[in-house]
Amino acid sequence: MKQFFRFSLLLLALLLPASATAFDFEVDGIYYDINGNEATVTYGTNRYAGDVIIPSAVTHDGVTYPVTTIGQHAFRYCFNPLSVTLPSTVVTIVDEAFFNSLGLSGITVDSGNPKFDSRDGCNAIIETSTNTLIVGCKCTVIPNTVTSIGDRAFDACGLTSIDIPNSVTTIGSNAFSHNGLTSVTIGNSVTTIGDNAFSQCDNLTSVVIPNSVTTIGSYVFWGCSDLTNVTLGNSLTAISDHAFDQCSNLTSVEIPNSVTAIGDEAFAACRAMTSVTLSNSLTSIGNNVFWNCNNLASITLPNSLTTIGIGAFWNCGGLTSLVIPNSVTTIGSSAFLACSGLTSVTLSNSLTSINDGLFESCTGLTRIEIPNSVTSIEDEAFAGCSSLSSVTIPNSVIIVGQAAFAGTPWFDNQPDGLVYVGLAI
């Protein structure tokens, strides 16, 4: 749905220039808006192509305006070969000014510009005072004086490979997203990688996150469908929400011991994943973390773990056995729903509740022993466990929810009438 929605917006945006004009005037094939006493480069009826040299000033109706700004989407969707030269007067570049311009192969800033530069012939725009690369293209070579890659700097620019030098410490949100990247080298000074930084880089097969990285954002590699190998650095403290969601060819992952939490849907729909090594410092597994990882054959939960989220292992049909350590106090609803291959489960003796649908439709499960710490078995907890013939329920259990054991041989073999649990009062 996300991909379809984005595509629909892209299609709409592609059609817009044919039916509307957003500029105040045109001179020599460049479109401008008037903002007070200044001019902003914008988009018009035709997309830019060829060598576009933006002047420092432009005259319209007898009035001369300094050109100070590159407007939002000014060079959007420029698919034909394009190079752009910015004058010394441009001091503002609005977000997504060069969005999805696959034809852009050259960017040059006049050497007299007080705010931006294109040092070392890098084919990029760099904010001079902060050494932040804010606009790149498919031919950019990142200079080793750049310390930060800005938000959306290379978003949908047609990039196929990139080396991020050791001078860079921060990679911004969506910095390299929606590209055909086949290889990326992340320098060993990077500490932060922002949200969606490499999302939907469909051709990326392998990535090494260096030990310097302490934070990776949400959706950072979302939808990297060809990604098969990931090395996570040993300074990470958390795997963020959706970090590797929809990486359908990722086969295995080793979570370093520095990681204490795995966010929601971090590895959801990683259908090729067969093995996961969890951190021995891990305290929480979020909601739907391994949802639909149906080839995951085994997993060892560490003794540090306290919380397993809702639907965490939903439809992990390859799991055959599971030991939930005594450190675990909470398991969310439907955490092991439809784990059809699961035949053996040992529950934590720190649990107080078997939550709704926890083992629902685990058709291979034959027996279960509820620990003495449990006081309630909630609705449909074991419903549809069509092989479950042996159940041990301790006297501590005082509540059994609706259809908790519906469709199990154990329940079907109970005598007619009420089935009691717990001690009589």
Image (cartoon, rainbow, N blue to C red):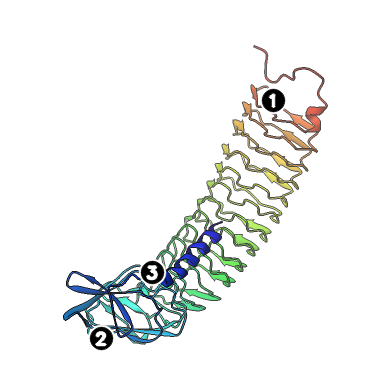
Task: Check disc 1 and give the amino acid type.
Answer: Pro
Judge from the rendering whether residue 174 lies leftward or rightward of residue 257; answer left or right: left
Label disc, if present, on residue 111 of the rendered structure? 2
Q: Residue furthest top?
A: 425
x then y, percent, for residue 6: 50, 62
Assess disc 2: are there few (<14), some (14-19) or many (≥20) residues with their C-alpha within 10 Å of its C-alpha: few
The x and y percentages for residue 393 are 71, 27
Question: Residue 23 at what x, y percent from top left?
Answer: 31, 72
Which residue type does callout 3 highlight? Answer: Ala
* Secondary element at tag 1: loop
Numbered mark located on residue 283 in the image: none
Q: Residues within 10 Å of mark 3 (few under 14, many from 20)?
A: few
Quadrant hosting residue 71: bottom left
Identify the residue position indicated by label 1 in the image.
Answer: 394
Secondary element under disc 2, as helix, strand or loop, is loop
Pointer 3: what residue?
20
